[in-house]
Image (cartoon, coloured by chain):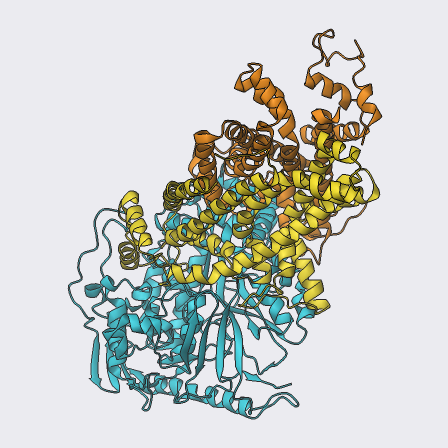
Amino acid sequence: MSRYILRRLLQLVPVFVGTTFLIYLLVWALPGDPFAGKCGERACPDAYVTRMREEFHLDENVVVQYLRYLGNLLQGDFGQTFSGTSVGELIAAAYPVTLRLAIVALLIEAAIGVLAGVLTGLRSGGFLDNLVLVSTLFLISIPVFVTGYVLQTVLGLRLGIISPTVSADAGFGELLVPGFVLASLSMAYVARLTRTSIAENRRSDYVRTAVAKGLEPRRVVGVHLLRNSLIPVVTFLGVDLGSLMSGAIVTEGIFNIRGIGGLIFRSIALREGATVTGVVVLLVIVYLLMNLLVDVVYAVLDPRIRYV
Amino acid sequence: MRARRAAAWAAAPLSIVLITTACGGGGEPGGGSAGASGVTISVNGTEPENPLVPGNTNETGGGKIIDALFSPLVEYDPTTAQPANMVAESIETTDSQVYTIRLKDGWTFHDGTPVTAQSFVRAWNYTAYSPNGQQNGSFFSHIQGFDQVHTEDPDGTAGPQTAPQPAAPEMSGLRVVDDRTFEVTLSAPFAVFPTMLGYRAFAPLPDLFFTDKAAFEAHPIGNGPFRFVSRQPGANIMVERYEQWPGAPKPSVSGIEFRFYESAEAAYADVVANNLDFIEVIPPSGLAGNLYRTDLADRSVSRTYLGVQRLGFPLYDPRYQNPELRKAISMAIDREAVNQQIFGGTRPPADGLVAPDVPGRVAGQCGDLCTYQPDRARKMFEATGFQGPIELTSNADSGNAEWIQATCVSISNALGVQCTFVPVPTFGEIRSAINARQMKQIYRSSWVADYPSIENFLNPLYRTGGSTNDGEYTNPAVDALLARADAAPSAEEGNALYQEAERLIIQDMPAIPVYFQSFQAGWSERLQNVTVTPFRELDLESVTVSEQ
Amino acid sequence: MSDPSVLGTAVAEPGSSGAGGGAPDRARSLASDAWHDLRRRPLFLISVTLIAFLLVLAAFPQLFTSVDPSAGDLARSRQPPSAQAWFGYDLLGRDVYARTIHGTRVSIVVGVLATAFTVLLGGTLGMIAGYHGGWVDTLVSRLTDVVFGLPFVLGAIVILSSFREAVGGGAVGITALVVLTMAALSWPVSMRITRSAAIAARDQDYVRAARALGAGPARVIWRHMLPNCLAPVLVYATIALGAFIGVEATLSFLGIGLRDPVVSWGVMISEARDYIRVAPHLLLFPAAFLAVTVLAFVMLGDAVRDAFDPKGR
């Protein structure tokens, strides 16, 4: 197992290089000049554009630019934004916030989703099942900007239970409501996935055997059924942490969370290659580690799966 | 002539005195208190796009912070936008070409060094010198010798050639007379020059800037009412009151937090909840149905500012060269309906090229041609034989889709031709195409004045080779009139000539003025005496805070 | 735990359906078995009826409304539902009912095709990776990580602006491009889901048995693993369908997706964004249609899964 993990960690290297290069290339391929829109409705002076292009080496071949970037990155230098802010500093400020938000969202979606899934999976077709189905449809068809806005208005402005926006510190408590909003779509999916998985495994041999042996129903569900049904759910949760981190643009905007979703989006719009690449590379490392964790968890959940 | 100008400038300090008394008198019955001197207020902002250097900042995010950190020679009245001397004691000229600028005594930078004539001349030369690559370099183009220090790239920035090294390091038109006096010689008479001096590009810079730029960028040093304290990227910039600031009125608040929000919606929610003190951009969700007036009862304002929204024609495209077509489209736009349905009545239909409140502007210059006349428009349009659908374009990242689509509805209903909105993803992308003269559609082209003068609405936009004449409009008669207006001996005579030029331009309709810009600002319950300037900024000197 | 109907399905019903086809004497294939099973489920019948109705809407919107969905009139901006306009008018005075009906086509086409391509691509790769394991798994998985790392907006802007000229200005070309872009950037999630299901199935007894009997990889995957791995992907697909219909609007709003006069529910929902408080009907109707569509596919997914699940019989 430890050799397996070591091998997986080594695979980080090619993925790291591949991702950084691909993203660098994509930002470079974005249409329009990054400095053309910097001077409002007036064309920027040639001198300004030339100076900035030189300062950021934009006139060079994209491969040369990339290698220079990679060299700096290996020395721990994430580069600078066009406004002269250190990208490393931006990342250091935004990452912890985003990670907290994503973890809160993940816990919420796992807790509510799995609970709803188990309850409905065991009693499919009942009232509860239909209630969860309707809520699921609701969460899917009502866009995040509406749920976020409504919760902010009702809880924050009308009732005054929460602050309508999250402070710069973004503590766990403040992130509960935004985390719920962010988790809503995935929650729907986790609930349905767990339901399906439970309903399916409920009919499998080992559960029948367990029941036939006269095991307590609670033990059957908790130990045998749940453990085996959670594999697809765990996979999804592992993958979803990454999506929650990078895809929180709308939620971040509504609740003023200074995370990486907005940072990535703005940097793409401004064509800040160094920022986009820096932020995303760290994200990819998070994905890889999560995927590794998920693969290890498979083996724990299902004794039949072995890694050699 | 000299006397008239002097009188005009002498009148300016008067308005400052009036504001001072209005403020110091504490007109508010229960709320206003002069004693709240230890209060820091928070103001909505966006992350500056550039280091905080006045000559290199053109956008509002960094602009409003620079305006707090720096005091220019001339300031604009926070309500009327009329210019008045600030750091300048006098600005004198006999021929609108040679200006003698005398500075007031006792002004210092935040590091304690004095503000001298040298501080201005060095800063201006630095900004204008093209190898320094400053965004606002072209603001000095009126000064003699500018063409010696600022060179253009012969084949554009994308081409292989680079701009030649300038022939001279400094503009010959700038001469320091003594510590408190300098002389500016322009390459041609330009009566509006003193008004320009209130723009931030003309701010002074301390010696530190020239000796250690990195230190300056990390901790900007200005001469304004507030000084830089700290900056947290992505979160905020803090400034505090500079006690040695000799200007008037003295700010009553002790500090300001420019807080950066992820979205205007979030900032707005915080103002409603009194977590943020001021927002100058109420988001569309607050503007819809004028909801902000109930959300922020008695603590919001709506006013026009120095901007006009236009639809520009790429006149280099043969399809748009017929002025009758351009006029027909202008008359097919129901500006009042767009204003009422999209903007809740806050953005007045454009009746000319110059925004309200701009010194020198007269109303109704566009007259008939900006009035909705569907039948006449249709007849004119059909006579032009224009083929194919009318396409309007804009950058999609600017929130202009609604009014452009509404305009399209009006055009297609009036002219009986299909009209569609074709978005372009980013401002940078559309700007690149405009700069390269590759536009094929009618495009949104808004203009916000850098300084309050009718001149700023005409010269840059409609003069042959003007800095923002993106449609390549050219009319020798207009150019001649504008040149005469620039050289006019007095502001009044100049304005009359500008107005004449404006009427002439409208007859060609090189761009359709659609509406005049307005902003909606809101503030927290504790803010009192709120004045929002025509530049969409909170007047930081006069605002007070009530303790509750 | 035991379901009496399980036994019932084993009884042959010859000749009742042409579609069930095949040779009636041989043990029926899984697919025909499933089909047989499906026809008798009310869940399936309701969902199929709903989907058929939506398809008719998509194909022949003119049957349901004669109003031009892009004809606006500023004078009736944001008017609430009335006898004249059942769903009211939008900001530009366009008929919301007509727009919702005409919006069905793009929404369904984009939603269904993007989901289908995403699941096909991700499912195939995930199945191959999960089945083979070893270096194939490593290669495919790491490729997935790289693609998953790409910010959607970045990838979409680059792909759509690069190929926009190539497909021309027609609605069909751009719709196809939008669908392919969405699929090309979204497959990693379904790949990971399928892979995990395949890994779990790979070592099950019936797969080992099939392999021991000499079945090739293609046969093992197709006949034995696929039916067992279908469930989680189907669930993902039904949820993703709803999400894709919304994503299409994001692209439009970034200025890189479908444009006027093409209508879609996603665009209508996004346009309603700033008017939730003053004109909720702008949001309500397209969102309701979206909900019904997702419901139909969720029910279909459930029915199909139940029918295909080998453990269920």
Give the residue drawn at x 24%, y 69%: B187
Q: Quadrant of residue B99?
A: bottom left
Quadrant location of residue A7? top left
* Chain coloured orange: C
Q: Does B378 sit left or right of C288 as displayed?
A: left
Give how far across and how far down residue C261 sits, in percent. Answer: 59, 39
Shade of chain B as shown in the rendered figure: cyan
**Is A155 or B2 nearer to us in this picture?**
A155
Specify whether B190 is left or right of C70: left
Residue at horizontal 75%, vertical 32%?
A: A209
Q: State whether residue B140 is above or below residue C19.
A: below
Q: Quadrant of the C terminus of chain B?
A: bottom right
Chain A drawn colour = yellow
Depth check: A253 or C189 in front? Answer: C189
Asked if residue A48 lies left or right of residue B306, the reply is left
Query: As displayed, is residue C115 above or below residue B353?
Result: above
Instruction: Give the answer, above or below, for where A234 lies relative to B473.
Output: above
Q: Is residue B69 left or right of residue C103?
A: left
Please tell me how many numbered marks the rendered image carries: 0
